[in-house]
Image (cartoon, rainbow, N blue to C red):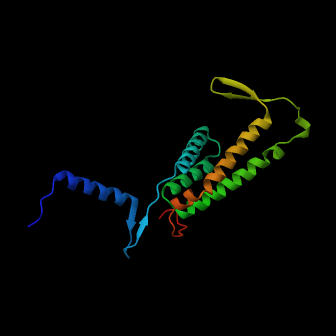
């Protein structure tokens, strides 16, 4: 005869089993593999890339590049190893280009030292020195590189090397 248990105890054990299923996956050999969640830093970076890409598409500036960035975000959310390599390459190239931006934009014929740049953001109009804008862009790029090479972000992607983003 089966021992009688209360429904509350059965429900608690069922909920605990469901929680452990979310945390780990068992493969064919019976080995348990823990599934990592999307790191908050990577989620914030994906959100940043998505917003920047959508605004670029709306503004019709670099539409192909924006579409490729959105595809990279989709691949990141799909936990593809190739997306990690794309993200790391993307951020390193971006840091290099932004770091060279002051040299690329240097024009001695049109150089007026000390004049700040004028920018409009909605109804707000401001004057900010160029070196301040470059410093903010470089800091954002360094932050993106740091996020891309963090061990938690690397652990998020599948360990099986698969360069097919359409798995």
Which residue is at the front of the view, 148 or 75? 148
Residue positioned 91% across, 39% down in the render: 108
Which residue is at the front of the view, 141 or 21? 21
Indicate whether 135 appears above or below 71: above
Using residue 18 as the reference point, say whether residue 114 is left or right of it. right
Residue positioned 78% across, 45% down in the render: 101
Q: Position of residue 133 (x, y in %)?
A: 74, 37
Using residue 165 as the reference point, say whether residue 88 is left or right of it. right
Residue positioned 63% across, 50% down in the render: 65
Q: Position of residue 142 (x, y in %)?
A: 69, 49
Q: Position of residue 114 (x, y in %)?
A: 86, 30
* Quadrant in the picture for residue 60: top right
Q: Position of residue 20 (x, y in %)?
A: 35, 59
Residue positioned 54% across, 70% down in the render: 161
Indicate whether 124 appears above or below 97: above
Residue extending farthest left? 1
């Amino acid at each position: 005869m089966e021992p009688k248990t209360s429904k509350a105890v059965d429900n608690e054990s069922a909920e605990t089993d469901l929680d452990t299923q979310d945390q780990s996956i068992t493969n064919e050999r019976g080995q348990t593999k823990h599934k990592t969640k999307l790191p908050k830093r990577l989620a914030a970076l994906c959100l940043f890339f998505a917003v920047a890409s959508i605004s670029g598409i709306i503004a019709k500036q670099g539409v192909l590049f924006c579409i490729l960035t959105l595809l990279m975000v989709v691949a990141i959310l799909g936990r593809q190893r190739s997306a990690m390599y794309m993200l790391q390459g993307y951020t390193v190239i971006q840091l290099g280009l932004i770091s060279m931006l002051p040299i690329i934009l240097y024009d001695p014929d049109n150089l007026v030292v000390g004049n700040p740049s004028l920018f409009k953001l909605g109804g707000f109009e401001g004057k900010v020195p160029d070196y301040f804008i470059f410093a903010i862009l470089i800091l954002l790029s360094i932050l993106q590189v740091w996020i891309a090479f963090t061990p938690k972000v690397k652990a998020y992607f599948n360990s099986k090397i698969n360069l097919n983003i359409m798995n």
